[in-house]
Amino acid sequence: MAATTIETVGQTSGASRLLRRLLAALGMTFLILFALVEIVPFVFTIANSFKCLPAINAGPWAFIPTSGFVECRDPATGSAIAASELTNGTTFRPSLEGYQTVVAENLPRWFLNSVIFAIAITILRLITDSLAGYALARIKFPGNRLIFFIILGTLMIPGVVLIIPRFLILKQLGLLNTYQGLIIPLAADAFGIFLMKQFFESIPKELEEAAEVDGANRFVTFFRIILPITTPALTALTIFSFQGQWNNFLDVLIIVGTDPNLWTLTLGLANLQGAGGETLIWNVFLAGAVITTLPMAIIFFSFQRYFVEGVSYSGLAGQ
Amino acid sequence: MRTSRFTALGAAALAALALTTGVFAQDSVTITLMGHSSSPAEDEALSASIAAFEEAYPNIDVDVQLVPDFDTVLQTAFASGDYPEVFYTGQSQFGRYVNAGVIANGSANIETPEGFYPALAAVYTVGGELYCPPKDFSNLALEYNKDLFDAAGVEYPTNDWTWDDLRAAAEALAASGTLPEGTVPIALNPDIDRWFAFYVQAGGTFYDEDGNFVFANEGANYDAAITALEFTSGLALDGLSATSSDLSAGWPGEAFGQGTAAMTFEGNWIVGYLADTFPELNWGTVEMPAGPAGDGTLTFSEAYCVGADNAHPEESWLLVNFLTGEEGAQRVATGGFGPMPPREASGETWIEAVGENGAAYVAGGAYAVAPVTPSDYDRDGLGNFIGGVFRGDEDPEDVADYAGSEM
Amino acid sequence: MAPVSSTTQAAPGGAKIRGKTLQENIAGWTFVGPAMIVLVGFLIIPLFFAAYFSMTDWDGIAPLNRGIRTEENPQGAYAFDGLSNYSRILFEEGRRQENFFVALKNTINYAIVVVPTQTVIALTLAFIVNQRWLKGKGFFRTAFYFPSITSSVVISLIFMWMFSTGGLVNSMIRTLFPSYSPVTWLDNPDGLFHLVLNAVGVDPSRDVLRICDPATFQLLGCEIGSVRVWDWLSGPSVTMTTIMILAIWTTIGTMMVIYLAALQNIPGQVYEAATVDGCSRLQLFRFITVPLLRPTTFFVITVGLIGSLQVFDQVYVMTSGGPANTTLTVAYLVYRSAFRDAQMGLAAATAIVLFIIIFVFTQVQRRITKEV
């Protein structure tokens, strides 16, 4: 909302207007520069995912595809096509070999598992994290501080050392190689609770006090008053949680690693990458990277408008 | 009353017994084989072998689990006490697993223990008893780029090359002025395994008679470690070799494929890689150059091990013997995959399958040594210091002292 | 809830307040309950396991159901070792101690550089993106966030490719400065301060530094925790710097999204009220925006600090701790001991020590940012 004020406030003199323009230009330059730095690597990732293996090695810089897809192997002999025929300067002849290899695997199943897993965990976390975050931010109850410290503490544990103990617990509970086993241990996370707590603390107390005067209890206040105005925070939590689980490797590996039917995209692609010992099959690897990243990009793109919604809600709630 | 009760009980017991044996006869035993994915062709060949096994032994089902980050998954399974009946074991892990008591001794169960390459069998032998039959292996050899040698007018390497020949050829290549800009005679990384390879050629050994790890510890071994490091780092310091990262490649094989190095020292995993990634490359292989102490190369291998806590040891050994027996080795050989079959008898078949460039790798099998370090040896930590010698920042003596000191 | 509210109604005065407190207590515990069950079950209890293992010689492989190794049970998986793992890391001179302190030094260097840098950049970006005059907000938001979407393994591999000696980064610098001699980003153990000294003609030569003699100003060669004083001070290596750039590059997107959400969370009427009271824009930023962002800043810095002190993925994929252990971090050391060196007891002890260090650091940081 700072933006609004900058636009509307201030009896501007000529000099300050010039200063403002200058600042805006500076900000814009900064922004564009950073956006470029962040985007360029992905341009090359996408371009190289459409190449044959020899072409990636011969000309990784080439990023302009020329017309028509090509086969990477001579159909008669089965041997690879030479790089000199595939890439030249900034242009290259695109191929789908990387994507075909990925798709030939159990891709739909992995994709479905990734979706189920990420959505289930995200929904559960939205509930558990925001409830806990609210309690820690606003409700005074014995153990409040202690619990906050414990939650903060769990963030500080180096994850690698928990691999074996977690595996033992899940084995005791009979949850290995099940969907529940994958979802329950991740149904709440310290990062999310901490995030929500900090957000709730930045909301002025007056809103709840007003509700309390009206006789609403904590549950009503939380669901009716507080939750609707925290859309930006919930959006952020949704995105972080979904993204984290979409890319989660270690937990998935340990809990369902031995049952390929429960593998997620990350795990399946990691297995593809394992092929060939020292050598990374770049076109397959990059095609896999594009396929796993794309859904996340779409989700982020479609969710991000909710970042602005919180403001209008808060305007209403204040009346 | 009493008798009748007993009779009834006896009858029930008999019936139960009949039922169980019946179940045994019909029902199958399932054993798990855990490993990691290799090349798609190898994975397919494995499933074919397993199918053949299941046909030969209809009462045994094999559940093949090829998992990513295999070592971590397997270690976790070990720790829980509930782990696969049969699993791959890399040579660097073998000692750890034996110490932890999770590997069954195979000496009484391996059908044909003869015929494996001696160096391979030695890796998986403890106290004179072979624990796990080797699955397949790779050796280091010298790869060279024929076009770059032709252009420089330098003779191709031969199998009886020595260090001096290697260095002389590298100097000739550099002096010829025919190497394109950014191309060096040799791609060589300052990694611990290349040090080990030249160490062996300089007369160093890894274990003494009592089984103590003696790399670079004292006397001849200490000298060999320094000689090896001086020779390899000398190549780097004189501009005759460069690391893969200097050559903008992920590993030396990639630099070699890109033609930015005329020679490199890799294992047979490079054969399939070059054919796929650099089909134009005109290259050849010879055995590793001989050092002051003669021939030497390194071998890297995996084995099939059977778990110690195992409800179906007999069935497990049936499977392992099926996969690693003479026929099993022959199947690996005809597939012509990256790694070579573990039995000497199948070497020729493998060369036929992969082409003449395979010969140098197979030849190395006769004298190769496995660079197995003790279970808690700080390999990564040590490997991190060799680069300093290649840059001239560290003395070979200091790194050898560090390596020879107790970890 | 029902019995509670009836109490509240029945009892007047003090009892009513007590009823209210009870109601709050029940609400509080109900709210945190589900999350706590998960965290205790799958994080806290495993932590106790780890603490237990840290006092044993367990290798991390031997099946635990074989029990404790004793005279009667020689097959046992582990034996108690007291605090000897801790002592090997912290007090006994030798390679284990050296590894730990080198890793600690690297980790602290990393956190000191990464946390402030990413926080400042993220806040700046969020602030600009939040300006109303900005066109194409969605594009920028996505562009900045994009690197965070991709898994760290993929990003690390792409970075390795970009930062290779003849790679994109070096070619671009060479285009701008033709006299530039390529830096080997991924394989250069020289510390930054070391390079700066070299550049001004001082060579803290290795031989001089090996001598430890405080009287002749050769203190830099003395060792603290098996690591030379100069190595403590020479700054992050070039390769470590590359990893820092990668970390900052990936994290600013996440941090920016958090700041953006926080900026959006500040109700408009707060500003309106302040404006009516005649605050200038600068005052608005100083007295309204910054204080209201304080919980968020606290969050961003705390999470950033904890994440930095646990940096693992990039090291795992890109360098394995090399060159010359200059990118060895404590979290990677834990992994290396546990899954490479078969030293689970030592790994667990290292992890517990790291846990304590992180705890101390966050407490210090809390004091500094004066939160709560």
Image (tube, coloured by chain):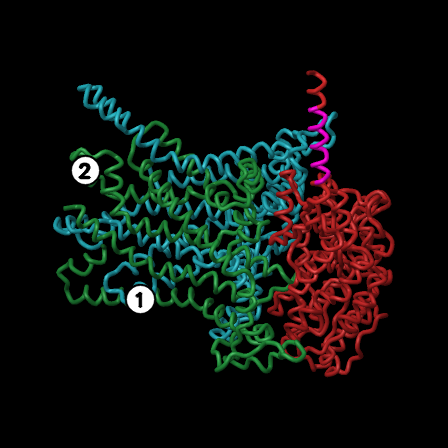
Chain colours: A green, B red, C cyan
Q: Residue at x 77, y 47 (%)?
A: B317
The mark found on residue B200 in the picture is none
Residue at mark 2: A211
Q: Residue at x 36, y 62 (%)?
A: C142
Considering the numbered disc 1 on the image, is that residue within a helix, a strand or a loop? helix
Considering the numbered disc 2 on the image, is that residue within a helix, a strand or a loop? helix
Q: Which of C224 and B152 is in front in this view?
A: B152
Q: Does the magenta stretch include residue B14?
A: yes
Task: Give, as a three-letter code, the residue at label 2.
Answer: Ala
- Above or below: residue B29 compared with residue C68: below
Q: In this view, does A31 lie to the left or right of B7?
A: left
Q: Position of residue A87 (x, y in %)?
A: 55, 80
Q: In this view, does B315 lie to the left or right of C323?
A: right
Q: Position of residue A235 (x, y in %)?
A: 33, 52
Residue at mark 1: A28
Chain to which the residue tagged by mark 1 belongs: A
Q: Residue furthest top?
A: B1
Q: Nearer the viewer, residue A232 or C56?
A: A232
Q: Does the magenta stretch include residue B284?
A: no
Is residue C327 visible in the rendered image? The answer is: yes
Choose mark 1 or mark 2, whichever is in front: 2
Q: Residues within 10 Å of mark 2 (few under 14, many from 20)?
A: some
- Above or below: residue A193 compared with residue A306: above
Q: How far apart in space, not on screen, are marks 1 and 2 (Cα)?
A: 42 Å
Task: Give, as a three-letter code, the residue at label 1.
Answer: Met
Chain to which the residue tagged by mark 2 belongs: A
Q: Nearer the viewer, residue C194 or A297?
A: A297
Lower position in the chain sequence, tag 1 or tag 2: 1
Q: Position of residue C235 (x, y in %)?
A: 53, 52
